[in-house]
Structure formats: C-alpha cells, structure tokens
C-alpha cells in the first residue's frame, strides 16, 4: 500500500512534465534505387517530429529560454536551434560529383560537392543575423567535427530566390533572412558520421541505422550526410537526418551477376527493430522495364517500387536483390533532369581565364533555368564579357533578369544570378572572362599549388509547359541541380622568400635613395690630376 | 671625363618636318591599332596595364556603372569616376573609337613634347630636332605598347605632357587645370605638382639654366609668396571642382577609397613592373601598414630636395620626378618610365655628361627582354616561378634608377662645365683636370 502511494506520488509529479512536453515521433526510412549503370543509390532518412512546437522567436533571444526536454529530438541540435533562433536549417556534407546523366535526380536535391549550409532566420534579435550565422556555423562545426568555420564571410551570400524555405516561416512581424555558404573543399568522413549517429534515438544499435557501416559508406562512389530542420505549421519542428550513398555492388560481388544484399553492400544486416520508431519502412525501386527478384518479397509493390514495413519483418533482416534481365540503358524517366549543365574554367594563364557554362536541353520542351553562381573573391568576373550563344550563334536574348553583386577583396563573394532560356534540342553556352586574384603569401593554404576549390553553381530548371486549351504558358519548377565544383590554379609567390624580398627591395631602394641624396647634397669641384698633393687641399 | 662624352650627332641629319612625322606615324599607328585584335592580345598584359589603368577593368566599371551597380563596391575597378563620366557621356564607348582616341592622344602627347622642346629653346618656329623629339615619344616601345593595349596610363601621359607644355607656355590656368585633372585621374602624379608650380613661377620659365645654377632661384625670392601661393590656390580650386564632379558622377564617396587610396594601400597585388607588388605579397601581415607608410613617404620625400636643388631649372626637376615616379610608384606600367625616357630628348645639353649611359642602356635592354619573358613563363607557361619575374622587375628598377641618376649627375655636372672645359678650350687640359663631388 505504501509503495502504491509512493508510485502515485511519483506519477503525479511526472505527469505535468509529460503534458507540457510536445509529443514526438520518430520515422526511419531506407530506400534503394537501382540505377541504370548497375549502381545502387541508397538513402537513409531519420525524421523526428516535435509536434506542436514552434521555433524560437528571435526577439526573446535576450531572455531566458524555456527548458528543453526531449525524448527523441536530438538535444544537441535543439540547443543550437534555440540558441540562435533558427527557423530553418540545411546542412549537407557531400563527397564526389553527382552524375545527373546516369543517376538522375535524387529525392534529396542537396548534392553539391563539399559542405553546404543554409539557414532561414528571422530578424529582430538583439544580436545581428550575421552574428547568429557565425555562431550557428561554429556550433555546427563543433557538433559535426567539420571545418564549417571556413564558411565565413568570404563564402556567405544571401540568394533568397534560389534557396526558398522548404517549410513554413512563422509570422513574428519581422522579415526572415537567408544565409547560405558552401565550401567545396570540405570532405566528409567517419569523424562526421560518429556525431551524426549520436543524434539518432536508437543510435546504430537497432533499426536501419545498424547498416551505417563507415567502411562501406565512405568507400562509395558518392556519399553525403544531410541535416535538415524545417518548421511545418500543422505539425511542428521536424528534423531529418539523411545519409545518401551511391554504392557499386559489382565491386563487392564475386560473381558476374547483378545482385546485392544488405550484407554485400554494408557487411551488416538489420539485427532488430528500433522500438521507438513510429514507422520503419524500406523501399526498393527499379528502372522501368527491368525485372528483379527480391527476397523477401515486399508487402506492397507498385510502379517498379517494392515497399516493406520493417515493423512486421523477420529479424535479423537482410534483403537480397537480383536482376533477372539485362540492365536497361535509360534513366527512369521520373528522375531524368531536363538539362545537362557543365561548367569549366578555361585558359592557361594564372592571371585571367574564361568561365564557360553549357546548358544542354535534349528534350522537346524549352526549359527556363535560374542560374546562380557564387564565386569567392579568388576569381573575379568581367561581367561585361558575358555572352550567351545557342548552338554556336550568339544570342543575348537568351539571358534575362541578371543580378550581380561584385566580390569584395578579402571579403564577401560575388554572386551572379540570371535566367537562361534553353530552347528544345539546343545547347546554350555562357562564357565570361574572369580575372584570377593575386593573394598575399599568408592567404595561401599550406598546399598552395593544389589550387582552390570553387563552390558548385546552382541551377533551378523550370519546364515551360503550354496549356493546349488556353495557350497560357506555365512554368513548372523542378528540384535544384548543382554543377561540378571547379579547381582554380592561382599564381603563387615563393613561400620561402619573405626575408629575401624585403632585403632585396629595401637594398635597391636604399641604394637609389642614397645615390640621389648623395648627389644632391654634395658640391662639384674641379681638381687637378697632375699634382695629387694639391688636390688633397680643400 | 672622357667616359661621359656621347654621340649626340645622330639627330643632326633629321630635317623632316614635324607635321609629316606626326601624320605618318599616326597613320601607321592607326593601321597597327586596327590590325587583327592587337589590343585584344595586349589588354591582359600586366606590363602594359596595371589594375589602375587596365582597359578591361575600365570596361567592366562602365558596364556596372551603366547598369546601376556601384563599380567601386567590388575589387576590380580602381579608375577615377571622371573616366566613367567621360566614357558614358561624351565619348562613345567602343573599341573602334577607343583605338582612335588612344592614337590621337599619343599624337597630341608627342606634339606637346615638341612644344615643350621649342619652349625650352625659346623658339616658336620648327627646329631640326622636332621630329626626333616626337619620334622619341611616338615610337618609344615603352609608350607605344601601353597605348596599343589601350591602357589609360597613355592618356595620363598625354595629360602630363599637356600640363607641362601649358606651363612652359606660361598659360597658368589651363596648365593648372590639366594638372588637376591628371592628379584626379592618377593621384600619384601629385609629385609633379611642385615642379610645375615652380615652372609657372620661374622668371625664365622652361629655358635651360642648368649651365648657370645660380640664376633665377625662385625659392629665395619673395616671388614665391606672390606667385606660387595664388597658383596653388587656383590649383586647389580646380581639384575641389573635379572632386565634386567625381562625387556627383559616382553618387557617393566610395571611389575615394578605391581610387585615391589605391596607390597608398595597394589593394590589388597583380604583378606589374614596379617594386611594390611582390614586396607586399611577401610582407608579414603585421608589418604591412608600416611598410606601406614607408613606401609612400619614400615616394614623396624626393619632391623637396629635387625642387630645391633644381630651382633654377624647374623643367629639369619635372623630368627627374617623372623618373622617380616611373621607378617607385605603386602601380607603374611601362608607360611611366617611357614618358621619362621620351622627356630626356628635350634635354640634349646633358647628353655629354651622362654618367654611365651604356650601363643604363644595357640594363634597360636586359629588363625589356626579361620582363615579358619571365611574366609569361611564370603565369602562362608554368615553367618559371614568381621569383624570376620579381628579379626582372628589380633589374628594371635598377635601369630606371640608373637613368634618373645619370640625368641627375649630368644636370649637376653641366653647371660647372664652364669651369672645367669652357675656360680651357684645349684638348690636353681635359686630361689634367677632372670634376668630382667633394
């Protein structure tokens, strides 16, 4: 009886805490997409929803924040989000170039090489947006053990029309602002994965996260981590932790058949279910026209996609997939991007060069593309040399809505934002002369001769669709694409020379200065060469 | 000293009229300017255009200016707002017009140089040396190539020559206006202010007084207060007007940091023929402000002594300070030492006393061959590194410095010519007597 009373007392103490804490749900989802070149695109998605919660109002930043009690939501992320009053946050760390031609679009569009971070936050805080942005990237850099501090003012821009918020923005009466930065030279590795896994409620002990084997993940042809925080008016703050990889089953298979399993791809299988996941799903999709046999069979299969509910599965769970026909050679039409964008920096000189971007439209419909180039000060644009040509003939009318912010030396990067009209079956080539900067010797990284990685450009294609009945033209926005990153070779001084240069130049100046003043201050006299003794006299 | 004797007689036979020379060379220049893409090949050459004078950057600035982007908000455009206003209103901005304009500016500069020569000789009629003086400017590779590359330093050279010419002709206000315009376009030309003011105030003007150093010392007379101060006031008024016009054109003061202080703060480390760029590329960050101050002060420190020493011949002081500018300024191009070399042709009286003319000539040939070679090897070919080009700029600075020293020595040495040779005409006397500095 006593113990019952005690339990009731404890319960009555706990209950209020239960009711004030918003309910939380955790969803995990694993998807495989068989690609036309035999590779497998994998996506792990871990989503936690904090029901009924709202982001912190920046005007309360000076005051004490409400206490943070989470059961599933990662506390480390919650603290960062509330400390800097972030409404929306997207961080991706990718390695490798995403091959749109062969791999198509992925569900997750942030595939740019290197680190990319962008946040939406409202104004109205006691500290400025840039201070909060700096704090955010430092905190995230510390959390994920990556050099996000390098996403400094030299890399930060605010291209609000390209990176639109993916959730809702609360109306606090103050405008929301975007900060975006990318760092192409940032690599992703095990040290980033370990803190990432720590944010998951089941860690890597159960559920699909068991498969996150760093040896296989970071061995993939392309791999990346992503953290996405959005706010939905109806649900609340949602955090999605995403890991994507393009794995090559051929490399691990002993036989010449096209087949893979969890065990062959990850050297792991799902040992047990994550008990706190509200939903735990697996989906496997195939290119159209291909026939695959799966073991075990999915609970549902429609349109080339097999779905599994891992809550009902038999554990340990392993999936065997085997192609029973030859591989087809077409990308799944749903995933095929309408444009092919290639970017290059040409020219042999370390003083100037030419940036060329080619947009190829192989489809029958014209495409309107929004192109965003963010360029650190290392490469400066001669915007007056920007030309556009369609299939080799120059046509300035292809470009419209050009917005340009010049780069500031040792400061903020340049941004060029423009719209390109790419007619059907046409290749549009943009070219622009660029000046390469000459840096102080202290500005160069330790491996200066390697060159500098320039961030990928972003393209948002819009399909131009003509409504047959009303003849009205409508634009359908497609997910954004990233171009390849570039490597620019900047002229380097001799790093062993500072003292020598100071000594040489100063000696020369002193010599000339001394000679000039020597001549200016001394008088000319006529002396006899005949008698030396006479000339000695004044 | 027999080593100082030098043949100056090559000029004697040239009796071609100035008009014919100018028009022939200008016609050739126009042909050259329109041969296939000469300026396109040369426009990125770092020896011919510095960041402050590059035609490409001027085009970029004009493009941004015409599209309502502040050209001074970026790091590419350092030209004066006056260029923006001129090229966006009066002169149509096209490559064709530009080629004509630069050719015309060169011809005008050569004409001005001939006028300076005539004013120095005190004649208004053509002389036999006119054509040679014009050719020394028009066909001087150091001035010709920057002009073909459409570097605005050619326009600034023309303005310099016009200002000196007008000062030589005693046209006070036009001269001061040209000088004010020059200094607004290229602030480091402030070095030429003092000698040009002295030239205007001097009783004998541009006439050669090198041989008689004691005559007409402006600085010791009350003339200084009476004439130089009002001249300075007038100059200052012109500067104020031009600065106001610049501010109106660019709609703000952002150009001050980009244009006026570019030559002091060295924001762009693009290689050029000068001494600053590699020094400040390799400079330790905490010493940078100190050495920027030292280099700026060093440039200014020559004004007073040269003007005091050559107060009897301010035109010669102008020559020397132009030589100093070509050697030591922050963003020189070949056109700056080129102007100095062209101006030497106006002072034939010093030729026989140049100290080491052969060494200087050889240094110039050496540097002129090495500079483009090493620049190309480093930046385009990838075979050499920055030190090679830096070494050739050192040689070039030696050549320019030696040129200044030669002229300085000769200008002082002429002053006692009468003592050494004039009174003793016979040949053998020269072997018995020599002139040294005590």
Image: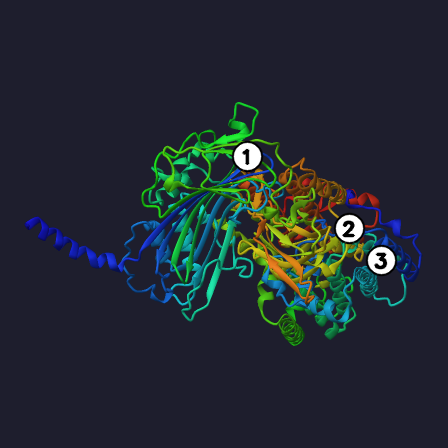
The answer to whether marks 3 and 2 mark residues whose Cβ atoms lie closer than 8 Å is: no
Question: Which residue is the site of mark 3?
Answer: B134
Give the number of the mark in front: 2 or 1. 1
Q: Are marks 1 and 3 on the same chain?
A: no
| Residue B88 or residue A90, whichever sits in front | A90
User: Callout 3: helix, strand or loop?
Assistant: helix
Give the number of the mark in front: 1 or 3. 1
Question: Which residue is the site of mark 2?
Answer: A392
User: Callout 1: helix, strand or loop?
Assistant: strand
Mark 2 or mark 1: name the one nearer the start of the chain: 1
Question: Which residue is the site of mark 1?
Answer: A292
Query: Is A166 left, or right, of A511 in this rendering?
Result: left
Q: Is residue A430 above or below residue A266?
A: below
Q: Chain of mark 1?
A: A
Q: Position of residue A153 (x, y in %)?
A: 49, 55
Give the number of the mark in front: 3 or 2. 2
Residue B380 appears in the rendering: yes
Query: Is B422 left, or right, of B240 in this rendering?
Result: right
Disc 3/disc 2 C-alpha distance (Å): 47 Å
């Amino acid at each position: 009886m006593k113990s019952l009373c005690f339990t009731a007392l404890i319960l009555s103490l706990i209950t209020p805490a239960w009711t004030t804490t918003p309910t939380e749900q955790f969803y995990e989802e694993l998807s495989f997409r068989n690609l036309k070149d035999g590779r497998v695109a994998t996506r792990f998605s871990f989503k936690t929803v904090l029901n009924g919660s709202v982001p912190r109002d920046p005007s309360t930043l000076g005051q004490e924040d409400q206490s943070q009690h989470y059961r599933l939501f990662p506390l480390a992320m919650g603290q960062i989000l509330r400390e800097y009053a972030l409404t929306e946050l997207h961080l991706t760390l990718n390695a490798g170039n995403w091959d749109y031609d062969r791999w198509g679009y992925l569900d997750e569009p942030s595939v740019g090489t290197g680190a990319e971070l962008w946040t939406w936050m409202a104004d109205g805080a006691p500290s400025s947006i840039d201070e909060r942005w700096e704090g955010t990237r430092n905190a995230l850099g510390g959390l994920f053990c990556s050099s996000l501090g390098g996403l400094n003012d030299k890399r930060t821009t605010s291209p609000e029309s390209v990176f639109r918020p993916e959730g809702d923005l609360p109306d606090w009466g103050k405008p929301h602002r975007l900060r975006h930065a990318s760092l192409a030279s940032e690599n992703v590795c095990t040290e980033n994965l370990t803190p990432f896994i720590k944010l998951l409620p089941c860690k890597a002990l159960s559920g699909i996260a068991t498969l996150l084997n760093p040896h296989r993940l970071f061995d993939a042809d392309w791999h990346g981590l992503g953290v996405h925080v959005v706010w939905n008016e109806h649900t609340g703050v949602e955090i999605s932790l995403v890991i994507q990889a393009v794995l090559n089953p051929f490399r691990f298979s002993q036989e010449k058949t096209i087949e893979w399993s969890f065990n062959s791809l990850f050297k792991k299988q799902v040992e047990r279910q994550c008990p706190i996941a509200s939903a735990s799903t697996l989906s496997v999709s195939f290119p159209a026209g291909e026939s695959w046999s799966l073991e075990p069979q999915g609970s549902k299969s429609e349109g080339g996609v097999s779905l599994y509910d891992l809550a009902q599965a038999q554990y340990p769970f392993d999936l065997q997939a085997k192609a029973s026909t030859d591989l087809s050679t077409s990308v799944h039409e749903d995933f095929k991007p309408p444009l092919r964008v290639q970017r290059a920096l040409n020219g042999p000189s370390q003083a100037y060069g030419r940036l060329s971007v080619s947009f190829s439209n192989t489809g029958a419909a014209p495409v309107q593309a929004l192109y965003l180039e963010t360029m650190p000060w290392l490469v400066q644009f001669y915007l007056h040399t920007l030309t556009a040509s369609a299939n080799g003939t120059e046509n300035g009318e292809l470009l419209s809505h050009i917005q340009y912010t010049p780069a500031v030396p040792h400061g903020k990067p340049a941004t060029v934002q423009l719209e390109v009209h790419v007619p059907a079956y046409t290749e549009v080539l943009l070219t622009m002369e660029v000046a390469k900067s000459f840096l102080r010797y202290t500005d160069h990284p330790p491996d200066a001769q390697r060159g500098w990685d320039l961030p990928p450009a972003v393209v948002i294609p819009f399909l131009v669709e003509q409504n047959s009945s009303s003849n009205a033209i409508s634009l359908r926005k497609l997910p954004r694409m990233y171009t390849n990153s570039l490597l620019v070779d900047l002229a380097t001084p001799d790093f062993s020379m500072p003292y020598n240069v100071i000594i040489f130049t100063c000696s020369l100046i002193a010599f000339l200065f001394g000679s000039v003043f020597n001549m200016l201050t001394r008088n000319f006299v006529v002396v006899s060469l005949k008698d030396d003794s006479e000339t000695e006299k004044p | 000293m027999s080593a100082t004797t030098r043949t100056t007689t090559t000029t004697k036979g040239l009796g071609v009229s100035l008009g014919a020379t100018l028009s022939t060379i200008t016609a050739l220049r126009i042909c050259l300017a329109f041969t296939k893409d000469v300026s396109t090949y040369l426009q990125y050459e770092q020896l011919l255009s510095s960041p402050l004078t590059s035609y490409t950057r001027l085009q970029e600035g004009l493009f941004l200016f015409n599209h309502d982007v502040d050209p001074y908000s970026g790091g590419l455009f350092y030209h004066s707002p006056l260029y923006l206003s001129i090229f966006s209103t009066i002169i149509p901005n096209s490559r064709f017009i530009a080629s004509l304009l630069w050719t015309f500016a060169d011809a005008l500069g050569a004409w001005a140089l001939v006028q300076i020569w005539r004013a120095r000789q005190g004649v208004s009629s053509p002389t036999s040396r006119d054509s040679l003086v014009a050719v020394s400017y028009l066909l001087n590779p150091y001035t010709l190539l920057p002009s073909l590359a459409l570097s605005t330093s050619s326009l600034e050279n023309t303005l310099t020559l016009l200002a000196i010419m007008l000062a030589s002709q005693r046209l006070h206000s036009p001269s001061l206006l040209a000088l004010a315009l020059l200094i607004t376009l290229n602030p480091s030309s402030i070095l030429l202010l003092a000698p040009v003011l002295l030239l205007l105030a001097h009783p004998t003007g541009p006439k050669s007084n090198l041989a008689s150093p004691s005559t007409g010392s402006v600085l010791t007379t009350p003339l200084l207060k009476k004439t130089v101060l009002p001249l300075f006031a007038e100059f200052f008024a012109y500067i104020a007007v031009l600065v106001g016009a610049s501010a109106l054109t660019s709609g703000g003061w952002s150009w001050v940091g980009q244009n006026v202080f570019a030559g002091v703060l060295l924001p762009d480390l693009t290689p050029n023929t000068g001494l600053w760029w590699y020094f400040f590329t390799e400079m330790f960050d905490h010493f940078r402000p100190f050495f920027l101050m030292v280099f700026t002060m060093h440039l200014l420190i020559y004004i007073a002594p040269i003007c005091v020493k050559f107060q009897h011949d301010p035109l010669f002081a102008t020559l020397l300070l132009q030589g100093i500018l070509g050697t030591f300024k922050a963003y020189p191009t070949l056109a700056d030492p080129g102007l100095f070399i062209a101006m030497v042709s106006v002072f034939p009286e010093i030729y026989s006393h140049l100290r080491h003319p052969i060494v200087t000539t050889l240094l110039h040939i050496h540097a002129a061959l090495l500079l483009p070679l090493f620049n190309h090897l480093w930046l385009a070919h990838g075979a050499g590194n920055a030190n090679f080009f830096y070494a050739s700029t050192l040689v070039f600075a030696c050549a320019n410095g030696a040129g200044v020293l030669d002229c300085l020595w000769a200008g002082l040495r002429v002053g006692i010519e009468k003592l050494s040779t004039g009174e003793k005409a016979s040949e053998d006397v020269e072997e018995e007597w020599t002139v040294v500095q005590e």
